[in-house]
Image (tube, coloured by chain):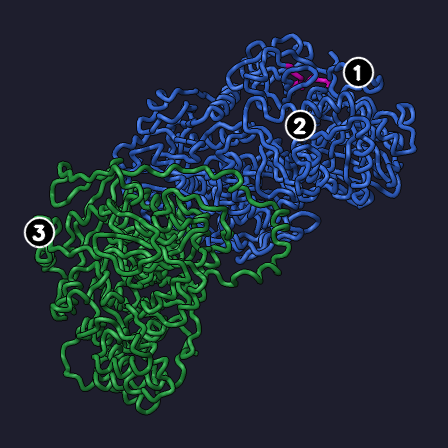
Chain colours: A green, B blue
Amino acid sequence: MAKVFTSFSQNVRYLTRSFEPRLLAADLGGQPRSKVTTCLFSTCRVDRTNTSYPRPRLSPQEVSTILRQNEGMIQLDSGGTGWTEQGYTSSGSYSIDSVDSNQLASNSPIEDKLASARCLHTTGYLFGVFDGHGGPECSQVVAKRLFDYVAAALLPRKELRRVVSEWEAGNRIPLIQVYNDPSQFVSELQEIYQDSFLRYCISLLSAFDEDFSMEEVLIQAFTQLDNDMGREVKENQQSAVLEPLLRVALSGSVACVAHIDGPHLHIANTGDCGAVLGMQSQTAGSGWRALRLTRDHNWENPDEIERVLSEHPDSESEHVIVDQRLLGVLMPFRAFGDFRFKWDLVTQSEIIQRYLGPEHLIRHCVTPPYLTVTPEVTYHRLRPRDRFLLMGSDGLWECMSPLDTVTLVGEYMSGRQTLQPVRFPRQAITLREVASILEQRQKGLNLKPVDTNASTHLIRHALGGSDAGLDHARLSHSLTLPPELVVLNSEGHDYQLEVPTGTTVERIKTMAIGHFFNPLELEGISVTDDKGDTSKTGNKSRTYRLVLEQERIRCEELFQYHWNREKQRKEQNELLLVDGREAPPIREPAPEEMTIPTMREIAEATVNLAKRNHNRDPDPMNHSTDLVVLNSEGHDYQLEVPTGTTVERIKTMAIGHFFNPLELEGISVTDDKGDTSKTDELLLVDGREAPPIREPAPEEMTIPTMREIAEATVNLAKRNHNRDPDPMNHSTDVSLDFLL
Amino acid sequence: MSQQCHTSADILKGSWYPPHQYHQHDQEKGMHISSTLPLDESPPKKAKVVICGGGMVGTSLLYHLAELGWGSDTVLVDQARIGAASSWRGSGFLGGVKLIKTEMNILRTSKKLVKELSEAGHDTGWKQCGSLHLARTRNRMTHFRKMKAIAEARGTECYMLTPEEVAKKCDILHTSDILGGMWVPKDGACDPYKLCYTLLKLAIEKGTHVVEKCQVTRIIVHNQRAVAVETTKGIIECDYVINTGGLWARNVGQLTEPHVKVPVHPAEHYFLYTYPIEEIDPQMPAIRDPDGNIYLREYNGGLMGGGFEKWAKPAFEHGILPDDVEERDQLEDWDHFHILLKEMLHRIPVMKNAVLGRLYNTAYGFSPDHRWIIGMSPELSNYFVATALRSGGSNAAGGIGSLLADWIVSGISPMDAYDLDILRFLPAHNNRRFLLDRVREVPGLHYGIAFPFGDCETGRCIRMSPIFPKLKAAGAVFGQVMGYERPSYFDPAKSLDSKDAGDSEHSEHSAPFHMAYSDTWTKPHWFDFAGQEYAACRERVAILDYSSFAKFDIWSKGNEVVQALQYLCSNDVDIPVGGIIHTGMQNSHGGYENDCSLARIAPNHYMMIAPSIQQTRCSTWLKRNLPGDGSVVMSDVTSMYTAICLMGPLARCVLSELTDIDLSTKAFPFFSFKELDVGLANSIRAMNLTHTGELGWVLYIPNEYGLHVYNNLVSIGKKYGMRHAGYYAMRSLRIEKFYAFWGQDLDSTTTPLECGRGFRVKLNKDIDFIGREALVQQKKEGVKRLYVQLQLEDHDIEVDPWAWGGEPIYRDDRFVGVTTTTGYGYTLQNLVCLGFVRNFNEKGEMDFVTPEYVMAGNYEVDIGGVRYSATVRLRSPTLPTKFPEPQLDRYLATRISS
């Protein structure tokens, strides 16, 4: 059933269910506040409208068990114990109350990784989300190594010198305290990695002593680690651990890392994970606002496209970004690993060709590097109404808008905070104000969620949320998906679909079309069931084909990017081959279409903001101008729009967002500017009808009697053998052979 | 009133007390009451009275004892500083309307005291601002009308107001959601702190001793009397000990051996004070909005509010009370208070603009039934208790202090209200966990509508008879009496035998427990169930659980028990073995201390059956009056027997099938007793009486046989169409047959001559008994009230509100008395009210009442403001029956010959 669907784009991704650490950091009048981590996956909102789910196959308890499997929570002492004896102030911790994390696997082994750690010698905390692709190895390794690189670069020179000398003397004193990760590298790898790290530390010592910049530190740590990963392969070609090293280097991972030290929040982002800050609206407690702190490095970001294209000769422009992907293969435009996009051609032929074979080279890879690891660093100074930070991999952002997630977590937090006694400000307060504060708390109490972990709460709602609250049937359904179907486009890029039981091939095709194509361009599309021609079709004649499993073999050569093990995984599944849509042309927006402030305007407006540690605009992603989309019933939806988005695009997005593409006919888009002057563009589009709230048929509602249960489960132990023992594939981390 | 404003710093430091002149003075100098009043450094070695606890009621008692001239012989000790704000904090309300006479009298006395003190120039903060009670529901309006009816009859000015009139009385009230109000113009409010200070000052001026920071560590008991109080500042020998320990009262009770059981548990109670606001009129009425669970008043230019929320929070849940009274103020739980705050802001919208002064969360002690606990402890005869005042100290303390002082000084108990007496409790009520469970619910009862047969939801299923699971499975709906679960009625649809429950998974033991409730002033929803049970009792046969009745064995070696009982009982108890006699046990005024049945089991052995609620009271009275030499032994066997009543014309047939004994009228006459074998069980004490005037037997079955006998009776009974019947049916039967019950109709001031039971008093024999003198005197002089049965005439049970007791009775348009118990007479087919008729002369004094006077009048009963005419009766009626029992029908429980 999977339909990937985000608020702002309709591009297809790996349907990884990814994770989102959300950190929640804020201070209110010096009070510690909580911080939350969560993780998500991809879901399909299309089905929210009208699908009726079969009787839930999972009980609420089973659902909760699955959801909570990877739950993690860190409660930080507000007093900041642990560093006071080292003479540091506890300022690092007071802004952070707790960290909630969770992840729900979509791939097995899980390719995403979460990490949280405390710097032992400085006062900050580090949190990261690492979303791997092409295998879990790179994300695993980056998650385990990166924080050490950051922590080392943060150390004062003197301290670093002491650490280095200790290390050289064989005493490997830790730089960070890692939460909730007991795993270790196998000793051979450990040695190589420690050696690299020591080299890095020494290079830091000898580096030119310039002013400390957090941004530089983060960028340096990212690039150094990435370089090391590539170098380690080259230098250890004779080693027994070459294979794992190679796998680390050839798989990839995007990363989003937050460093929080008191009110100072830095986010370093590489790729398409995201971090959002949840802010309480200034009007006492009514509503939440979301501030995106990262930009995605992918096809959706015009700046990125421009950057990538500018780095390569014009002759290549046709091949650099194909099908919204780097060289037609890679979704994110920045990442760790993926050295087939980074190594020069000589190294590639030395290593890839030698160890893997020529078929593993990337087509059109002419002037590497195509891929960079350099993160974009954002600084944000935490204010009292910043209540939490949400970090998540693209799976989260694909199924929920930042505002939705922030509202969910915000409400969740009000529920949590009412557990503490209320304290009123010391100055005179009227009973009206008292009552209003209590009212808010009461709301929170009533909404008290079933989950104690904010991340789980978010996942639960992302999976099971419906207009009328949590829908257990939906939730159960989302967690009991049948085997995945794979959609291939003619170039062999595959998309995994999750399909509800009973879905017909016809329906999948319809979904696929709705999903991959701009609904505005639907007219003239014909769907055929042509099994013959797998060649690439022309731009205008759009044909979609269904390829059955046996034909899949013929497409095998199209798989440039997947490890062999994937073959077995997919062998029994039906395969759908549909034509891919072209990337829409990137059009330079005409000036008159710019309805939101330009970068310059933003810069002017924010010129007086605290500028510490960064040379660039402190808040490049400031979407201060919210656009309001109204449907015909007057319900409004707020959109936050990246800079440079055109009105046309917003309209397209709005339609794609609020309407079932299948029901598009008869929809008119108007451009009514009458009501709201100012800079806001008002889009009035016809609403689709709210889906009728269906009374579940009695037979769906009835709980089985004890007797029925007994009958149904009489042979359970026996029958279970025949079933897939792990239909969900929700094991946390498959023990990799190079991890203990 | 002072418009002075305290500084906010005071509030925030938590040291803000109501800004009285003297207190501010104290505050500025950092002094306590001890610096303005001459307190004693240490207690005297000897005193007549030691009062333990310097809260409002202790202070009031001290004052009243001083007024009665015992000042120099009285000492008050408190573990903390005297006059701590939290011990003298309260609403300050004075007045109010109560259905219970004693309660109402206590409130009146309090108000009178404060008025008098103010008129004498003392500072009490008194203002006669009137009290305004608001109703949001029709049931509340009916409740108010009933309260107004009784209050007016007893001389308290009282008006029902429309919402518009309410708005006129207090223009800041939001009135759009109320249906009306009750206005009591003579009510008022005081400043509790000032009042207590004044009382203390006056008491000290009269020579009383007051010692603070003096903790009672032990109370020494000798011969069932408290003889000395051991404190941290020395031992005080004494004649009386008064436990006014408030929420510590239960703990103080445990300082004696045996423990004096004072069932109180603290719960959180909130007082909100605001800074002054302009809109407030200093003379605004005291507002009670019981449907919103709140009260409000003007206080120093601002508002003060509190409430009795539906579900309260217990305080000091772990049973460890603080030593320091200051710790009685706990961290305020705003979320909990929010419910009340919302109601307050709703009721007085301008309150939203008021600046928060301070919210106090003060723990108060509550009894298990929310009523005050007053009286002489059952354990020790010179140990008095006055506690569980909720937060209404200022309202009640004055009256309670006066009552207790009179009692102690005169030695005569004025305590005629079962509902307030400490003797209404059992040791079981003193279980801390029970109290903890119950206290959540208790504060809310205060502002609940006092529907008939009110019961609690917490603390249930504590005492149960062995056949309880069977009754539950038979569809019983239970009410609680003395902790006992007694079937109120049976709902066949809830029975496991019913069709609905046919394939239910419930077994007998898992059958759901149903609590009885009545949420209406009109015809209750169980009316038809009780009616069917009533019919079974009168026309076929029914089985009832009487296990809750108090049961005692009294015996002696020789004849002593007869002698002793002859002295205790007003009837001639020297009956043949195998006989049963109804008798009262009178006090020296001739009033009923106990009303019971005595079965003579052997020449020197009686079994006593008394009403359930009499269990503690009975044994206390017996213990105190049986010979001190131990020659007569008494044992409470309540818990040893299951009591099953088989009632109705076919009872004889049913029982005959299970026993060999001849049950004919001749062989086993009415009012006789035999020990039977029933089924395969033996030693069952069968008494041929039913307490309702129907034919039947009550079987007192040793508990281990209970189930066996029950099963046999039920299985045989099927043949005869036997039904289960509950308390409501039985109550209807006995009201219709004009049977008086102690605690409901009779109290310790009622004499047998007043209630048509002169025929049960052995005045014509020359046997002395307690109260004889008074009764002889009364017989000579005549009585000042008579017990009557009134049958309403034009009352429509479907439409009109019902009488549930406490309704004024009018004779020839003049108030003559109040109904005690009432019920529907299923045979008489109308409401039947029992009550007393007096004859008030012009001065309001009681004149003598003769049967002629009673019969000559035209009667009306006022139910919620509407008077229904009624026919009067002085003797039990003879009801038509298909199965006449000549012997039975001749017996009239109540009879006054004219």
- Report the magenta residues as a range: B778-791
Q: Which residue is mark 1?
A: B882
Which residue type carries mark 1?
A: Lys
Where in the figure is residue B257, as x and y percent of width and height?
66, 53
Earlier residue among tags 1 and 2: 2
Q: Amino acid at mark 3?
A: Ala
Q: Secondary structure at mark 3?
A: loop
Residue with the mark numbered 3 = A590
Q: Secondary structure at mark 1?
A: loop
> Front-most of B737 and B477?
B477
Disc 1 crowd, CA 10 A, few/some/many (<14, 14-19, 20+): few
Labels 1, 3: front one = 3
Q: Amino acid at mark 2?
A: Tyr
The local crowd at label 2, few if under 14, some if 14 to 19, many if 20 or more residues have their Cα within 10 Å, is many
Q: Which of the image's four quarters has the C terminus of chain A? A: bottom left
Label of residue B728 in the image: 2
Q: Is residue B16 visible?
A: yes
- As drawn, A12 above or below B599: below
Magenta stretch: includes residue B405: no
Mark 1 to mark 3 CA distance (whole Å):
105 Å
